[in-house]
Image: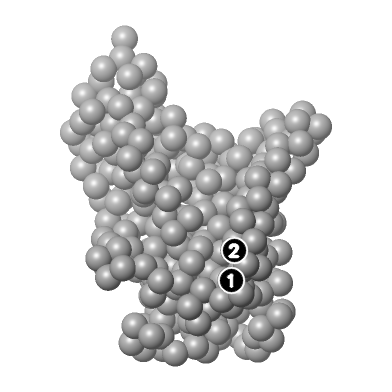
């Protein structure tokens, strides 16, 4: 485990140094990510400026949802570039080289590129989250700070699981099906708002099939100390991000099944 962490740190360091060779490009792309995600929040602000509330929910409360989901996604987006390119590696046969190395294929793909410019998205989301928390006067106990850390971990794991699942499909199709990307990016947009505003069937999908509610809505309720109109307990709200970790574990097992199924298609 220690050697794997050390190796991944070396991958990240090499990627960081590579990106820093073009600092002007890095600064511009980082700002672009900050600006583009900022536009998403402006759209939410305009909505609340027009209607003041979304049911019983205030803008500041939605800021908590927005911050949690976008920080989680930014963490995954920064480290999953290798899986985005995996279908190309399968078709070219480049994946064969990874199999010959005495290292986990997951670790090697995760270390392909650490996309540092995604810090723009993370920073913007963190600022929105901080604004919401400050305005609402959240009392930052150790338990709540731990819950935020657990939520970001669970959220990053869930999104990583989705991206790994998309890459895994290439073992059978030699193509990366974009439907998972649609679910991932669409899920980010969906989870920026409280779960009760959606229809029952939609809530069930994002709770039991793709458990995005477990890494935004439920832990956010625990942070806000707000009663859930859907009836969940405080204990469930606090532990729900662990479902994101479990989802990642299941996706990794599916990945290993795909590796066992793999037959080289490259030349």
**Residue at position x 42%, y 50% from top?**
186
Q: Position of residue 153 (x, y in %)?
A: 49, 64
Is residue 184 depicted above or below 158 in this figure?
above
Residue 59 appears in the rendering: yes
**Residue at position x 31%, y 68% from top?**
199
Residue 125 appears in the rendering: no
In depth, the one of 208 and 48 nearer the eye is: 48
Distance from disc 1 to disc 2, alpha carbons, whole Å, reads 6 Å
In the displayed structure, does residue 17 sit left or right of residue 110?
A: right
Mark 1: secondary structure? helix
What numbered label is drawn on residue 51? 1
**Residue at position x 65%, y 45% from top?**
36
Q: Quadrant of residue 97?
A: top left
Q: Position of residue 159 (x, y in %)?
A: 43, 53
Q: Position of residue 190 (x, y in %)?
A: 44, 59
In depth, the one of 249 and 198 nearer the eye is: 198
Tags 1 and 2 touching, CB below 8 Å: yes
Which residue in the structure is indicated by mark 2? 47
In depth, the one of 62 and 95 nearer the eye is: 62
**Residue at position x 71%, y 80% from top?**
135
In the displayed structure, does residue 82 sit left or right of residue 37?
A: left
Q: Residue furthest left?
A: 261
Q: Quadrant of residue 139?
A: bottom right
Q: Using a 10 Å C-alpha cutoff, classify the residue at mark 2 as few (fewer than 14 neighbours), some (14 to 19) or many (20 or more).
A: some
Q: Position of residue 240 (x, y in %)?
A: 38, 75
Mark 2: secondary structure? helix
Locate the C terminus by quadrant: top left
Is residue 265 depicted above or below 194 in this figure?
above
Is residue 249 depicted above or below 133 in this figure?
above
């Amino acid at each position: 485990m220690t050697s794997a962490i050390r190796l991944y740190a070396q991958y990240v360091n090499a990627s960081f140094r590579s990106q820093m060779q073009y600092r002007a490009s890095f600064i511009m792309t980082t700002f672009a990510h900050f600006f583009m995600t900022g536009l998403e929040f402006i759209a939410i602000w305009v909505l609340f400026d027009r209607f003041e509330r979304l049911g019983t929910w205030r803008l500041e409360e939605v800021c908590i949802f927005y911050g949690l989901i976008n920080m989680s996604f930014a963490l995954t987006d920064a480290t999953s570039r290798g899986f985005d390119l995996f279908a190309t590696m399968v078709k070219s046969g480049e994946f064969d080289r990874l199999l010959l190395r005495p290292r986990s294929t997951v670790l090697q793909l995760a270390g392909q590129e650490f996309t540092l410019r995604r810090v723009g998205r993370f920073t913007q989301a963190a600022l929105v989250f901080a604004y919401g928390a400050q305005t609402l006067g959240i009392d930052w106990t150790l338990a709540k700070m731990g819950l935020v850390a657990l939520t970001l971990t669970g959220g990053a794991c869930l999104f990583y699981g989705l991206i790994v699942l998309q890459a895994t499909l290439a073992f059978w199709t030699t193509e990366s099906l974009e439907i998972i990307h649609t679910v991932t990016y669409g899920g980010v947009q969906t989870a920026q708002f409280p779960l009760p505003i959606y229809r029952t069937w939609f809530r069930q999908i994002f709770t039991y099939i793709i458990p995005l509610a477990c890494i935004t809505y439920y832990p956010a309720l625990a942070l806000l100390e707000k009663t859930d109109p859907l009836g969940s307990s405080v204990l469930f709200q606090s532990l729900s991000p662990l479902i994101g970790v479990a989802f990642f574990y299941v996706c990794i097992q599916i990945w290993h099944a795909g590796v066992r199924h793999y037959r080289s298609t490259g030349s």
